[in-house]
Image: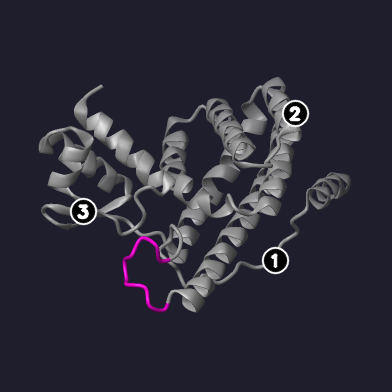
């Protein structure tokens, strides 16, 4: 592996996992020494991260990890909604029903009790994403999804400490996989829409809670201190999203009624 690729992958993982939080300074000399590479491959790695939108260059030799605020997350989900609903609809028309039926069974058996189980669940989501990409068979769509998922890894950390949301997400993914397996394109797209709506609402609520907690307990914390707030740097005013029919039974029943009227 090239030195620049190794540096890129290490920094990407550290940004996505929160080891390098938003606002963390990536000084060129320090990072090159820490990663065991020369400054040229480090610059290449930082350039790739900048192209991904994960870091921002503040000066020729100082780069910082990009912030993630409520507006960024809303913008990300706007794109994600358009791409993933289209992908789910297309996968239901083109995909291998047996493969998605097997994935639906895996989601039915999934557990999110404890960190290890949560990691296994996210690994299952990665398998689902890979199957979705293969079913869609559209390089332009999958490339766009890949970019969104690069940022999504950071955002998903905000839901890891919400067991109720994770449990609901399992059921939502099961319904999406089942709809694709059954070739029901409209249910697959609508179930994806509701899943993303719920995910966004939960993340924005987490931001509001973190901001409120930070305001109550961290009034004396220095700006930019890594201990001040969450991976979002203590975002305030995240707001909310409108209510929507959100339960799996409601979605299934709605699909049946719609077909009955057709």
Q: Is residue 183 visible?
A: no
Q: What residue would you read off at disc 2?
A: 105
Q: Earlier in the sequence, mark 1 or mark 2?
A: 2
The residue located at (71%, 46%) in the rendering is 167
Q: Is residue 152 visible?
A: yes
The residue located at (71%, 29%) in the rendering is 106
Q: Earlier in the sequence, mark 3 or mark 1?
A: 3
Q: Secondary structure at mark 2?
A: helix
The local crowd at label 2, few if under 14, some if 14 to 19, many if 20 or more residues have their Cα within 10 Å, is few
Q: Secondary structure at mark 1?
A: loop
Q: Nearer the viewer, mark 3 or mark 2?
A: 3
Q: What residue would you read off at disc 1?
A: 243
For residue 63, the mark is 3
Residue 82 locus on image (x, y percent): 54, 49
Q: Secondary structure at mark 3?
A: strand
Viewer-nearest residue: 39 or 44: 39
- The region drawn magenta spans 219-228
């Amino acid at each position: 592996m090239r030195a620049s690729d190794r540096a890129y992958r290490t920094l990407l993982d550290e940004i996505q996992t929160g080891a390098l939080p938003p606002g963390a300074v990536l000084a060129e000399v320090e990072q090159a020494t820490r990663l065991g590479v020369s400054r040229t491959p480090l610059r290449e790695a930082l350039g790739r991260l900048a192209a991904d939108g994960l870091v921002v260059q503040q000066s020729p030799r100082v780069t910082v990890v990009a912030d993630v605020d409520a507006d960024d997350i809303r913008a990300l989900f706007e794109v994600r909604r358009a791409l993933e609903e289209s992908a789910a609809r297309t996968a239901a028309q083109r995909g291998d029903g047996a493969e998605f039926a097997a994935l639906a069974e895996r989601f039915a058996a999934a557990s999110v009790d404890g960190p290890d189980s949560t990691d296994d669940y996210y690994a299952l989501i990665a398998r689902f994403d890979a199957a979705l990409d293969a079913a869609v068979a559209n390089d332009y769509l999958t490339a766009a999804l890949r970019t969104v998922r690069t940022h999504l890894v950071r955002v998903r950390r905000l839901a890891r400490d919400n067991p109720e949301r994770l449990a609901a997400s399992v059921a939502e993914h099961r319904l999406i996989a089942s709809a694709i397996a059954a070739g029901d394109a409209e249910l697959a797209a609508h179930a994806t829409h509701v899943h993303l709506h719920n995910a966004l609402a939960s993340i924005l609520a987490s931001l509001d809670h973190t901001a409120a907690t930070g305001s109550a307990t961290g009034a004396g914390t220095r700006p930019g201190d890594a201990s001040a707030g969450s991976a979002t740097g203590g975002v305030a005013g995240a707001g909310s999203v409108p209510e929507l029919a959100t339960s799996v039974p409601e979605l299934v029943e709605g699909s049946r009624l719609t077909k009955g009227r057709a």
